[in-house]
Amino acid sequence: MAERVEIFEVGPRDGLQNEARLIPVAEKIALVDALSRVGFRRIEVTSFVSPKWVPQMADAGAVMAGITRKPGISYATLAPNLKGFDAAVAARADEVAIFGAASEAFSQANINASIAESLARFAPVVAAAQAIGMPVRGYVSCVIACPYEGVIAPEAVARMAADLLAMGCYEISLGDTIGAGRPQTVARMLAAVSALVPVDRLAGHFHDTGGRALANIDAALDHGLRVFDAAVGGLGGCPYAPGAPGNVATEDVARHLAARGFETGLDLDALDRAVAMAGGMRDGNA
Ligand code: HMG
Ligand code: MG
C-alpha cells in the first residue's frame, strides 16, 4: 500500500489573510465548505487575531459559525493570545495554533513581541487548551530566512521548535515564510531541528516565492516529514514580494505527491472545484 502523506489545508487562513479586498463572509464559508468535500483531515479556517493587524480576519467568528462541519475534519484557527483563544473556543474551533518565529525582527513585526515574550504569551494559551483537551499546533516562521534579518541559523529554528514542543504543541509547522529555501538549506535546517524534535511531530510549510517549494518538499520528504501545509489555488501571495506566488498550491502538492507514489486521500476533482473557487477570490478576480 502506498505511504500516506497528509496535506494540511491552510488556504482560507494563510491564503486569504493576504488578499487586500475584503472578501464577503459567504464566499469564505463557501470555500471552506468546498474544501470539506476534498478529503482533508485538517483545515485552517481563520484566525482570531487583532482586526487592526489583519482586517481580513475580522469576521473569524462569522466564518466559523457559517461553515458546515463534516465529521472527522478538524477545523483549526490561529490564536496568538488568550483573547484569541477564548474567541476560538466560543467559535467551536477543534484546535488552535500559536505562531512564533525563529527571527526576532519578524516576531516583533508580526505579533509585536520578542521571541521570549511570545513564548510567555503562548504558555497560558497552551495551558488553557490542555485544560479542555483541545490540541494546539505550533508554527515557527522564517525557518530559512527573514525579510528583515536575512539568513536564519538552523539552531535558532531548532530552539524555537523545541520550546513549542516542550510547551505542549502536538505538531510544529516549519514555515519558509518568504520562500527562500533551497533543498540544501532545507536539509540543513531539518537536520538541526530533528536533533531536538522527532520528525513525526514536524510539518513543512513552504512558500513558492522562489519557485522551489516542490523541490523543498522533496528534501523534507527525504528527511522523513509526512505532513505539509498548502493553500488551495496557491492563495496568499507574499506581502514582501508583490506579484510572486505565496503558499505552495495544494493541487500542485497533491499531484506531485501522487506522482511520487504517495497517497494523500484527496479527491482531485473536488479539489479542482475548490481551486476554481479560490481563483475567483484573488485580488482583481472578484
Ligand atoms: P498588540 O497590539 O501587542 O496587542 O498585538 P495588545 O494585547 O496590546 O492589544 C491591542 C488591541 O488589540 C486591544 O484592542 C486588544 O483587545 C486587541 P483595543 O483595546 O486597542 O481596542 N487584541 C485582539 N483583538 C482580537 N483578537 C485578539 C486580540 N488580541 C489583542 N486575539 C497581537 C498583538 C498578537 C494581537 C497582534 O500583533 C496580532 O493580532 N498579530 C497577528 C498577526 C497575524 O495574524 N499575522 C499573520 C499570521 S502568521 C503567518 O501568516 C505565518 C504563518 O502562516 C507561517 C508562515 O507562513 O511562515 C503562521
Ligand atoms: Mg504561509
Image: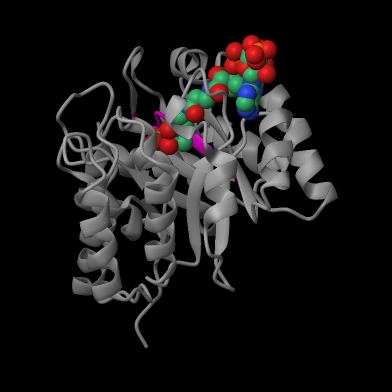
Give the residue drawn at x 43%, y 62%. Answer: 33
Q: Nearer the viewer, residue 184 or 256?
A: 256
Q: Percent from the top left, x then y, of residue 242?
A: 18, 24
Give the residue drawn at x 28%, y 24%. Answer: 239
Q: Quadrant of residue 168?
A: top right
Q: Is residue 248 left or right of residue 62?
A: left
Q: Percent from the top left, x then y, of residue 199?
A: 50, 55
Magenta stretch: helix, strand or loop mostly: strand
Q: Percent from the top left, x then y, of residue 39?
A: 41, 72
117 up-or-down from 7: above or below: above
Give the residue drawn at x 82%, y 52%. Answer: 132
Give the residue drawn at x 33%, y 59%. Answer: 221
Q: Quadrant of residue 121?
A: top right
Q: Is residue 188 left or right of residue 159?
A: left
Q: Is residue 107 left or right of residue 190?
A: right
The answer to whether one can see residue 225 in this image is no
Q: Nearer the viewer, residue 281 or 114?
A: 281
14 up-or-down from 242: above or below: below
Q: Which residue is the extreme one toward the bottom?
A: 1
Q: Percent from the top left, x then y, of residue 246?
A: 25, 38
Indicate the quadrant containing the N terminus: top left, top right, bottom left or bottom right: bottom left
